[in-house]
Image (spheres, rainbow, N blue to C red):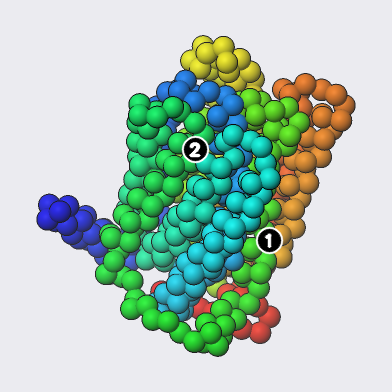
Amino acid sequence: MFAFRQFLGGFRAQLQRRAGKNGGPRLTSKLSVVALGQIVAGVLGLAATPLLAGIYGASAFGIYALFITALTCLGSVCTFRIEQAIPIAKTRRVAGNLALLAIGSSIVTSVAVAVVGFAITNKLEVSWAWGLAICLPPAIASYACYQVVGMWVIRQQAYVVLSAMRVTSVTGCLVIQLLMPFFIPASPTMLACGQIAGQFLAVATGACLLRSSWPTLRFETLATLRRQLARFGSLPRYDLAAQLLSQLAIQGPVLLIYLGFGEAAAGVYALAQRLLATPLTFVSSAFSQVFFSEAARIATDRDKLRALLSQMLAKSALFVVPFTIVSIACAPWLQMIFGPEWDSIGVVTALLAPVCAAYVLAFIVTSIFVVTGTQSTRLVREAFCVISLVVGFLVGYLAGLSVVPTIATMCCGGVIGYSFAIYLSWKVVPRRPVELIIDSSQKLSPAA
């Protein structure tokens, strides 16, 4: 324990030396610090994917994908998106109160999900439902805590800690998912347990490394919390709906494929999505976290904000475009790696690659809607993406096509939707210098 404390102390000291008191590293250095953690986590995830596919099979992956769909949709809105205001809060005390309120909201939501989930599961005659119903409430709580701690880390611009959290999350998840089948039969519940363990481990890592930066949290009166939250105007209201739509656009296709073609087809789609999303997370998470932090700092300067947006899109495209080409070229070899149970994995991966690339470019600059106070426009953007994917799926399904052609029509809709999302992200940057507007009557200075 003493040695571990010494390690954390040295790591924190290194972090403080990197950040410095007179300004952090340049943008490229910040991106490289965050991307390093994403790369390590991604390599671990990719290396373990063939093992997980062989241990659990397509059906288990399909069921686990349904669990992830429920987790991300509920987990991303259970805090009512209050944590998104943490990086732009004016004082550390206000940010701490927002963090406390977000965690409290997630606990209440987790309890409600447990009650409703158990009631629904009791009516179902599905063998795997009870295990996942038990796992869902703690998974939602850990997911929400990860988001809150992550937003606090972004506020502190502690990019080394972001990398450490990502690595510990993936490592903890994979250890549980790979080792548990040696003791009890493999099931989708084990995959869910690994997800929970990884998220809680990452939360503990971030909280320990930055424990000195946390303010003294104290319970405020309800009126005080309401007053502080009101300063952020439409941020929670619009961002809540927009985030739910965003998660539906990502995870919704799994549910559609499951309903239309069964759990094995959903498992193939989920595995293809995992193969593409894992390396693309290198770019999306690193760039989006740095972009949010930097955009909040320069939000009142139109020219700098537009330059930052252009720089982020250009730098991310340097990775995303070649990756998409390589993914399509290498897709035919995936079946040899994963075996006959995954016979369509190569085609599905090739079809999904352009959609994932367009999504990453759109996701990286999503926080532009927060810092410019245009959350209603983001709501339009996310709604259009969901509609495009659903319409694409229905075109293929109602035409009587098989699973692969239906996925192809859905991917066409996805590319159109996310291309429009990128266009809207550029259009919301003000054409004249303005203050950081959070609602029509209140103004908030960017975080120091």
Name the spot of residue 394 as percent of width and height, x first: 82, 35
Residue at image coords 58%, 76% = 232
- 112 vs 57: above or below: below
Residue situated furthest left in the rendering: 2
Q: CA distance from mark 1 to mark 2?
A: 29 Å
Residue at image coords 75%, 58% = 380
Find disc 2 in the rendering and name its residue.
Answer: 189
- 303 vs 434: above or below: above
379 relative to 228 in the view: left or right: right
Find disc 1 in the rendering and name its residue.
Answer: 241
264 relative to 180 in the view: left or right: right
- 17 vs 258: above or below: below
Which type of secondary structure does the marked residue at label 2 adopt?
Answer: helix
Query: How many labels were placed on the picture?
Result: 2
Mark 1 or 2, which is nearer the eye?
Answer: 2
Residue at image coords 72%, 54% = 381
- The image quadrant that residue 241 belongs to is bottom right
Q: Is residue 68 visible?
A: no
